[in-house]
Amino acid sequence: MQITITARHFHLTHAIRDHINESCEKLEKYFENIITAHFILSLENNRNNVELVIHAPKHNLKSEAIEKDMYISIDNAVDKMEQQIKKMKEKWADYHHKRGIKENSQFVFANLIERDDKRRTIKIKRILAEGMSVNEALDRFDEINDPYFVFKNEETDRVNVIVKKNDQHYKLIEP
C-alpha cells in the first residue's frame, strides 16, 4: 500500500508520520488489497482535521475526523475507515456466498447428439467445490446421502471426487 500524507498549515513531524504508518498496518490486517491511502492533515482554529481517502479495487472510501489532538484525530479517522472496510467486506462475502448458492442449486438440461435414432438428454449439475483435505471430505461425505462427493483437494489444489463403493470402501478420483 502506498501512503501519501499532506500537511496543511503546520509542520509534519516524524512522530505523526510514524503514527500514520502504524495505523495503516492496522488497516491492512482487515483488507490487504488497499492500493493507496491518502491522509490530509490540517490545523484550523485549534482543531485538527484528518481526512483519509483509501483506494481499493472498484472502491474509494473516505473518512474524516476533527479533534483537538492530531493523534486522536488520526485514530478516529482510521477507526471510521475500519468500519467502512468491514462493511464492504461483508457485502463482498454476502454477494459471493449468494452466487455460490445459486451455482450449487443450478441445473441445466442439454440435448446431446442423437445416437441410434434416440435423443438423449443429460442433466448438468453445477457445484461449488469447497477446499478441504481428503479426511475432511470423507467426514463430510458420511454426513450426506449422495453416491459421490466433489471437493477441491487442498494438498493438490485440484478438484477430486469421492465415490462410495460399499459401506467400508471408497474410491478417490483425481484428474
Image (cartoon, grey):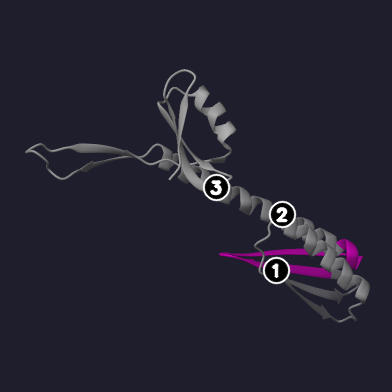
CA distance for labels 3 and 2? 28 Å
Q: Which residue is mark 2?
A: 30
Q: Earlier in the sequence, mark 3 or mark 1?
A: 1
Instruction: Give the secondary structure at mark 3.
Output: loop
3 and 2 marks in contact (CB < 8 Å): no
Establish if 103 lies above or below 143. Answer: below
Image disc number at residue 156? 3
Residue 134 visible in the displayed image: yes
Residue 31 as seen in the image, left or right of residue 142: right
- Front tag of 1 and 2: 2
Report the label total.
3
Which contiguous range is marked in magenta? Answer: 49-72
- Front tag of 3 and 2: 3
Mark 2 belongs to which amino acid?
A: Tyr
Query: Residue 71's spot in the image, x, y percent?
Result: 89, 65
Q: Nearer the viewer, residue 28 or 128?
A: 128
Mark 1 belongs to which amino acid?
A: Val
Q: Which residue is mark 1?
A: 53
Query: Residue 76's spot in the image, x, y percent?
Result: 82, 59
